[in-house]
Amino acid sequence: MCIGCELSQQLSSCFSQAVLARAGTTSRRRVLQAGALMAAAAVAPSLLQPDARAVPAEGEADWLFEGGTILTMESDQPRVEAVAVRGRTIVYAGDRSGARRWIGANTQRVDLKGGMLLPGLIDSHVHPLLGALFRSGLSLKIESREREVLDSIQAYVKANPGTGVVFGNGWDSNLFSSQGGPNRHDLDAISADRPILLMSSDLHSAWVNSKALEMAGITAATPNPAVGEYVRDANGHPTGYVREAPAMLPVINALNLLDPGTYGQLLRSLLLQFSAMGFTTLFDAATPFGQEAIYTAVEQLDQRSELPVRLHVTQTVTSEQDVDGAVKRLSELHQRFGAEHFCISTLKIVGDGVVENRQAALLKPYLEPAQTYGRLAISNQSAEKLLKQCQQAGFDVHYHTIGDASLRQILDALTAVRKQGINPKLTLAHVQIADDADQQRLARLKPLITSTGIWCIRYQATEQAIGTDRYNKMFRFGRLQRDHGLNVALGSDWPATYASGTLGIEPMLNVQAAILRQPPPPLLDAMKTALGPGASEPLPPMQDAFTLEGALEAYTVAGARQLGIDAITGSIKVGKRADLCVLDQDLTAMPTDRIYSSRCLLTLMDGVARHDARPNAVRAQS
Ligand SMILES: [Zn+2]
Ligand SMILES: [Zn+2]
C-alpha cells in the first residue's frame, strides 16, 4: 500500500542510475487509490532538553486551557483539569484551582467547552516533502473523463491568471487511450504561453504542453531515459505524454518547481493543512531527489518562523547500489542542514515493495501469479551493515517492511548485531505481514513500530494476492503495544492513502480505523466499490485493534519516542514545549464510530498558535 515509499524507490533510481525493475502495468489498485498519491546538525543539544529549570514558580501565562477533558499521555498524571503555557513552555498542568495563579491580564483563556486538549499530534510516517510537490495546484478528479478534464484545466487557468507554471495532478492514466495517451496540443489550446505540467493520479505519468517541453529542451532528438519515455507521434516528436519519473524530472527541474522559493510556498501551504488537523511534528519518510533545494527551503521557512511543524527527514536506501555511502551521505546532510524544528538524522531503508505490484517480499509465494515471491531490496549482509553503521554514527534506522520476508530479514539483522553488543535504534514501518514465528520475535526484540490506521481494513485485492490465511493475520500490533510494551506509533503514509485530497491524513479518521479495523464512512464513500465486497466488515484479528488510549498514545508520545524528541514534546508535562491541540469533541465521551467527525480548533507548536479556528475567538498570532 505504500505508494510514497514505492515512489521514492522509483524516483531515487534515476539518481543512482539504477534501472528499476518495476512490475509491468499500472495496477488497478494504484489507479483506484490514486486520487491518492502520488540536520539536527545545527540543533544544539540544549534544544532537545526540557525547560524544567526555566519554568518559573508563578507568573502570567500566555495561554490557559480548562473546561474539557485533558489527556496528558503521562502515566503518573494521565488527566488534568488545566494547563498553562508561558512562552514556548508548559508551566502548569494540574487542577483548576492551582491554575488561578497563572492568570494575568494578557492570558488567553481557552474554554474547551467540553472538548479535548491533547499533546500536539505526530505523524510518524508521512511524505509531505514529495506530497507538497505532487499534490499541489489543480486537483483533477480521477473519475473525470476527457471533456470534463479539459474543461477543469481551462477553468483553472482562467481563475489563476499570470505567467507562472500551471501545475496539477489527478488525471486517470487511462484517459485518451484511444489516441495513445494525452496530447500537448489539447493543453496548447488552453495555454500556449505558460508551461503546463499535470501529473497522473498514480504519479507515474505527466502530461505537458509544448511550452514545458520547450523549456526542458525535449525534442525529437532527445533520447528516452533507461526507465520511462517521452511518448512520440508518427514523426518522432514528443506528444507531451511523459511516462515515469526519470523522464519527468528534467521537466520538473526546467520549470523550477524545486526552486527553494517556489517549493517553500508549496510546502508551507501543505504543512498548514497538517497544523489545521492538530499536527505539530511530522516524520517525512523519503526525500529521493532535490534534497538540497528542498532542505534549503525548509531551513528558510524555519528561519522566518514559518515552519508550523517540527519536521524530521531521512536519507533513503532503496537498492543495493545505495548501500555504500548511504551513511556517509546522511552524515553530510546532517552536518549541512538543520534548524530548530528541522532535523535529518534517520536512514530510511525501503526493505521491499508492496503487495499490489507483487514486490512485497514473501516467505511463501503469492497466490497469483503463482510461484512469485516479490523481492528484497538489499542483501541480509547490507541490512546488518547499515544497522551497525547507523548505530555507530548516532543515526536512527527506519525500515519499510510489507512482506514477511523483509520482516525476517530485518529481525535477523537486528538479532545478529545485538549479539555483537550493538543496539541500533530501529523503527519498522508498516509491518503488514508477519510469519507467526516472527510475530513472537517482535514481542521479544521490541523494535519500534509505525503503521497506518486506515490500512487496517478489508481490501479484497490483497486477499486475492496472498490468500485468506495470511490476509486474516495482517497488521498485528495492537497486542504488541498493549501486552508487550512495544512503542507503536501511527502515521498516515499520505499521499499513499486511498482517497483523493488530504482525507488520508486525517488523524481521527485513522484513530477510528485503528480501533474498529473498518473504514470510517468518509473513507468508505471515497473508495466506493474499490475495496471490494465486505469492505465495511472489520479486518481480523480484532485482538489487534487499538484501544482509544493506545491509538492516541500512538499519535503523540509514541511518535515522539520514535523521533527521539520525547524529552521536549509528545506529552503534556511541565517543562516540555507547548505543542498542543484542541479538539471540538471529547473522544472519550462519544461513540467510537463518530470519532472521525471530531475537528481540531486550535494548534500550538512551541507555544505559538499555528492554527486557530475557534469560533468567536480573538485570533492569536500565527
Ligand atoms: Zn513504505
Ligand atoms: Zn511511506
Image (cartoon, grey):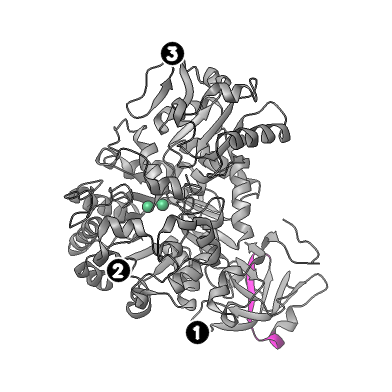
Residue 82 in sight from this viewpoint: yes
Q: Amino acid at mark 2?
A: Asn
480 left or right of 551? left
- Residue beneath disc 1: 76
* Mark 2 CB within 8 Å of ligand 1: no
- Residue beneath disc 3: 220
Label 1: which secondary element: loop
Q: Label 1 to label 2, Cα distance in Å?
A: 37 Å
Q: Tell me what residue is drawn at x 26 percent, y 40 percent.
A: 324
Closer to the eye: label 3 or 2: 2
Give yes or no for residue 92 being in the magenta stretch.
yes
Residue 172 position in % (x across, y down): 49, 40
- Residue beneath disc 2: 472
Label 3: which secondary element: loop
Q: Tell me what residue is drawn at x 30 percent, y 68 percent.
A: 472
Give yes or no for contact between labels 3 and 1 (Cβ–Cβ under 8 Å): no
Closer to the eye: label 1 or 2: 2
Q: Label 3 to label 2, Cα distance in Å?
A: 52 Å
Q: Which residues are magenta?
A: 87-98
